[in-house]
Amino acid sequence: MSEELVAFFKALADPSRLKIVGLLARQPYSVEELAALIGLKPSTVSHHLAKLAEVGLVYARTDSYYNVYQLNKETLDEKARRIFTDVDLGTSIADVDLSAYDQKVVADYTRRDGSLKTIPAQKKKLEAVLRYVVEGFEKGKRYSEKRVNEILKGYHEDTATLRRELVGFGLMQREGGGGEYWRV
Amino acid sequence: MSEELVAFFKALADPSRLKIVGLLARQPYSVEELAALIGLKPSTVSHHLAKLAEVGLVYARTDSYYNVYQLNKETLDEKARRIFTDVDLGTSIADVDLSAYDQKVVADYTRRDGSLKTIPAQKKKLEAVLRYVVEGFEKGKRYSEKRVNEILKGYHEDTATLRRELVGFGLMQREGGGGEYWRV
DNA sequence: AATCTAATTTGATATATATCAAATTAGATT
DNA sequence: AATCTAATTTGATATATATCAAATTAGATT
């Protein structure tokens, strides 16, 4: 699907082909005529027409010796409408792993045992690491501050910073008085 | 103008850049994040973003260490709307000489003195040559058949064929009875 | 001021492709 | 059947460009 989109843009991403499309928008032409009009050899024009035909932008009608090409306006209009919708933009990232950045950061900052080498100073990386750390807590369960520190100790010595940042980034919450924590 | 169109299509005619656009359609990202998400090095992503920025599809906001890029949806929508109109298709052929094919055919079939080597057998070429021959007649003036033949003789011996084809292609007309001809 | 860090630029390389000439093909026309 | 003719295919070449590594830059942060 994304391939189809790329092919469509590639088909139009060339000055000669754009001229051909512009000419065919006015009237059909044979290969020979197009070649004379845009100043290229027929073999080159044939190559361009093949690319345009591949994505359905043009098609040929045979007339005696000539292959008379015409523009497929339906394809052009349809693509123009569809291509820029959110849905279609979505298709271009169908095979993108949206957690790849987090994974990379976590891999950079953890040892084999899963503990942190350091706590990242950069906000974006800190957030990625915290999203990883918070997985050490079960959803819907309440933890005492003492228990929280025991769990965080498995990730890094500086449990106070981890605790504070987890709350600061809204990944955990604490009850005002008693000192109970839970994962959000 | 056509250059701008080509640049726009070229900007989108690449799988990596299409993924970047798809990701930025959802939310802004830094170069580093995009690189991790689509599996390329930051320098490569930087190169792609530069191309997208050139055509106004993305722009960057600086945030501490990061250059956070976002999609310019206005540009995307505007181009999508404008690009496929007849007007814009017209711009792609602004520098195309629409008489180039006729010129080439006439050059192929005439001697230096302007006379025809042969009368083309192919319809399209014959038509181009006839459009050239008919220029030997003044618009709005009436000619006797004898005078028509004298003029055609300057182009080719076979004046009967030329005369018949000129009328056949609608380039000249003849009055039913008297045998007077005029250029259409 | 010194140091860090993400981004960009530069240089190198491999791949894609626009173009043409020459050869081939497909389909009329004679 | 033989011949013509436009179109296509094949092969060669030059140019464009996607990608990465290394160097540099710009802008925080310490």
Image (cartoon, coloured by chain):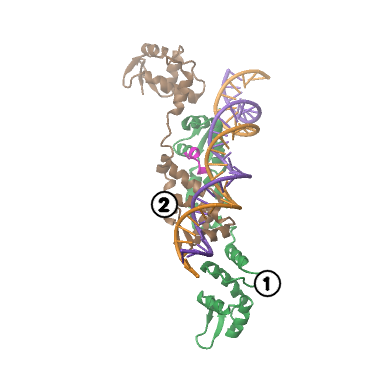
Chain colours: A green, B brown, C purple, D orange
Amino acid type assigned to the residue bearing label 2 in the image: Glu
Question: Real-space Cα distance between discs 2 and 1?
Answer: 52 Å
Point 49% across, 46% down: residue: B9
SS class of the residue under badge 2?
helix
Q: Front-most of A153 and D29?
A: D29
Whether residue B134 is in magenta: the answer is no
Q: Chain of mark 1?
A: A
Measured along the vertical axis of the image, is residue A86 above or below residue A181?
Answer: above
Give me the disc on residue B78: 2
Answer above or below: position of A68 versus B67.
Answer: above
Which quarter of the figure is the C terminus of chain A placed in? bottom right
Q: Which mark is residue A113?
A: 1
Q: Is residue A16 magenta?
A: yes
Residue for point 48% across, 29% down: A36
Give the quadrant of residue C20. top right
Q: Which residues are magenta?
A: A11-18
Where is residue B147? Give x, y as percent.
Answer: 36, 12
- The amino acid marked with disc number 1 is Asp
